Amino acid sequence: MNIKKLGRLVVPYLIWMCVLVGLPLIIMVVLTFLKSNALDLSTAEFSFDSWRLLFSDLTVRTALKNSVVNAGIATIICFIIGYPVAYIVANSNFSNKLIILVLTVIPMWSNSLLRNNAIANLLSERSIVNDVLNNIGLSFIWPIRGVFYDSGFSPAVVIGLVLTYLPFMILPIYTVLEKIDKSLLEASMDLGANKVKTFFRVTFPLSIKGVTTGIIMVFLPSFSGFAIPKILGSGNLVFIGTLIDSRFMNRNYNFGSLLSLVILLIIFGSMALIFKVDKEGETLI
Amino acid sequence: MAKKLIELRNVTKTYDGSAVVDNINLYINENEFITLLGPSGCGKTTTLRMIGGFEKPDSGEIILNGEIVNELPPYERPINTVFQRYALFPHLNVFDNIAFGLKNQKVPKEEIAERVETALKLVSLPNFAFRKVSNLSGGQQQRIAIARAIVNRPKILLLDEPLAALDLKLRQNMQYELKEMQRKLGITFIYVTHDQEEALTMSDTIVVMKDGVIQQIGTPTGIYNEPKNRFVARFIGESNIIEGIYVRQNLVSFMGVEFDCVDIGFEDGEKVDVVIRPEDLDLIDPKGAKLVGVVSSSIFKGVHFELCVMVQEKEFVIHTYENKPVGQTVGLRVDSYEIHLMKVDKE
Amino acid sequence: MSSKVLSLSRKIVLFFRRPKVEKTLKITISIIKWVFFVFIIFLLYLPIFIIAVQSFNNSQLMYDFTEFTFKWYGMIFQERALRQAIMNSLLIASLATLISTVLGTIFSIGIHSLTKKRRQKMVLLNQVPILNADIVTGISLMLVFKVFMYIFPDIFGFTTMLLAHIFFCLPYVILSILPKLSELDDNLYDAALDLYCKPATGILKVIIPAISSGIFTGMLMAFTMSIDDFVISYFNTGQGFDNVSIWIYASIGRQMSPAVYAYNTAFSFLMIALLIVISVRSSLKKRKNLIRFSQNKI
């Protein structure tokens, strides 16, 4: 059939993906076993230094801990806020498309670095909100920026992460909630479950797919990002993203690649998880 | 004699190693209403799609007007199709849907308007031209799909279960209308269905298929009265099938009793399958009857009653106008010309 | 003891079941619900609002609102570096959107016509750039492009950034189109061929219009992702080819020109206006069709 011929249209995409996904993977793996100045192969020598460093360097451990703690807290908060929001939208009478646009796409037209910079200013001792409030006679000080605890938890960073990535939690959950057949809920009520029971026994289990995607979509960028910690963490905290960035900027591609592979490992794990719950990728948009 | 319009010679099509259509031979005459009938997965739709040009046969030839057309793409065949779920173009209105084929053939504008109007009249939906397709009912969409195909004046119209999605009453009306349309237009219709009643009502010729193999080709009455094997007998109408022995010419024995019969072509002493249609069995007084049994169930079916009668452990289905209470002993009678004999299936 | 607890709990349940109480409870819950909802939207838009306020602030200081002014809007194209960054961002986003929409549509049709198992594998592969951390994607692409530099020494800058943006935009386009394709009647394409369309015309005349809403969504996603990207652009630029994000990142901690707030606010409003115009136009088109239909009926 002609449709089968159309399948050939995929071939260029496959090649494109092989070159841009497969090839760098190989380059990175090779780089971890070398000691080189950036990609200069003429002076490169075989070395296990990067691997040794990965298991011995305290900075790596601290960075991983800080990243996990802040990304974890941000993900949990996003879930606690995002699920109800998605639920409200899915069950509202308004034009859902419009609300989803307002919740997810439109904020992104405002540059995310600029938004985080605004948050940073808001959380600083002297912020425009405080200024305006001062002008009308109210005053309170709000110094959160730069504060962090021993666990690595930095409230300012978490606020920035939540406000940046919340849409990525709302969207997939909304997508699955909207697709749930309303007659299933009626059937559950008909079989004697009340509203609360129906939610926990029918709606929530059916939305797990979206929740999984949402959690991954929030956790991964929060965990690996380096711009938001840099803007909101005021430089005192090391994150895995900032560490990778600094390694590559110092032309140490070897250790940088190894750290990237660590992140990639986590990502592959999550992808396996997503593939298990959502084979057609319908919750990703 | 009618002229052969299209012919399939030794056509085979396999998917993933299994033959969906297995060495089919078939010819279709001009102005014929032919139905491919069979259960789902029997290869009837694949056969239709090969005629339409949407699939290529792995081997064999499809011959149209004396020319092999295996490689001819659909857009170069004088054949149009009414698809199963209509496949109307959702972004076009009714007029543009029907005009689609004509526009691609570069028919002048005035003629397009004229022909679309005629087509709409033919399917009894005049004034529907500027409606959105999605706002139409199933029956209306179905008519538009037919109009979209016949407006191109094809030599052959392929219909792939076009009535399957309609409710019973509408389906029966459309059966009648389709038959009328075919007579009026003089187009060859190749119709695919799994509904035996539909096939019997409309067709000039029925092709019964199973597992990619043609079981029987014949007229509706021929196939109903003279099924070639158990599958055809069971699939077309209801039937009682009993194992028997062809004693000698004009005599067959089953259920331990000998009956007169008229079918020929068997050897003396050969095992045969005996087919008796439920409406061909008559209830008589048990005294002196060749077959005697007890009524085990009775269901009112509107025009007739459907009785089940147990005769020596074998259940007979009988359609009759008079009801008998469950448990009553009855006698059964069958006329010799209504006993149909078939070769025993090898399986 | 336990019977006392039981009767008490029953009393509580009965109390809440009383029609009046039930009604007030319902109203309270729905009020809480909407307050919560509005509050979340408020939080999401708070930074944007602050940026907007700042863009009208006469003072350069983030914490000191002195006077209302439009002067920064006039400054948007005055500062050379910022103007160049804005031009670059818009150029890259438009080109990346255009190219990934066209290619994404073609690839989607290809993926859709694969067998189920292969399709699932392609969908999984397609998710790699979406799920992959930006930093890993950015570095991966940079490494590949660095290798390419042996053949094309001058690619870093515009070319690499454009390729990188196409790379992460494509999957979003494909993911928005695929569901639309699977909603289509399987025979739609066959019907086009049956009605005398050649294969390519069939896709253009029938498939593309039928999935146009998916294509539009994909375009919107691609443009949004591209215009907002920082990390991947950051690793894949060169020869001073900065986009707005990179410009901002470089200015953080230093005194940032408020013109960027003006640009950001103006851009958001233009995009929203554009979206409104598009949706109004499409609803007008629908109404036109309706009028045509009703006239025809009479």
Image (cartoon, rainbow, N blue to C red):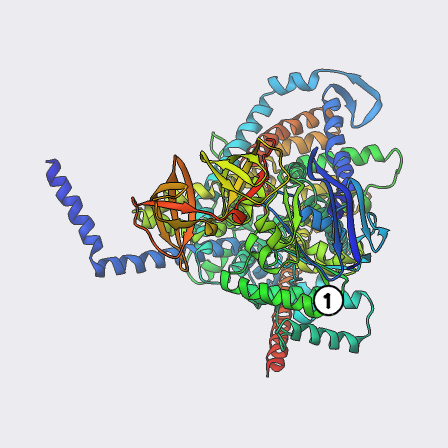
Q: Tell me if I can see residue A195 in this picture.
A: no
**A272 relative to B175, above or below:** above
The residue under label 1 is B186
Could you tell me which chain the residue with mark 1 belongs to?
B
In this rendered view, identify the residue nearer to me: B308 or C296: B308
Using residue C286 as the reference point, say whether residue A8 is left or right of it: right
**B124 relative to A281, above or below:** below
Using residue A69 as the reference point, say whether residue C30 is left or right of it: left
In this rendered view, identify the residue nearer to me: B128 or B284: B284
| Residue C275 x, y percent position in the rendering | 63, 64
| Residue A78 x, y percent position in the rendering | 48, 44
What secondary structure is found at the residue carrying circle 1?
loop
**Mark 1 residue crowding within 10 angstroms, few (<14) / some (14–19) / many (20+):** some
| Residue drawn at the location 68% of the way across and 64% of the way down | C73
| Residue B289 x, y percent position in the rendering | 39, 44
Q: Which quadrant, please, contains the N terminus of chain C?
A: top left
| Residue drawn at the location 37% of the way across and 41% of the way down | B292
Q: Tell me if I can see residue B69 in this picture.
A: yes
Q: Which quadrant, please, contains the C terminus of chain C?
A: bottom right
| Residue C3 x, y percent position in the rendering | 11, 38
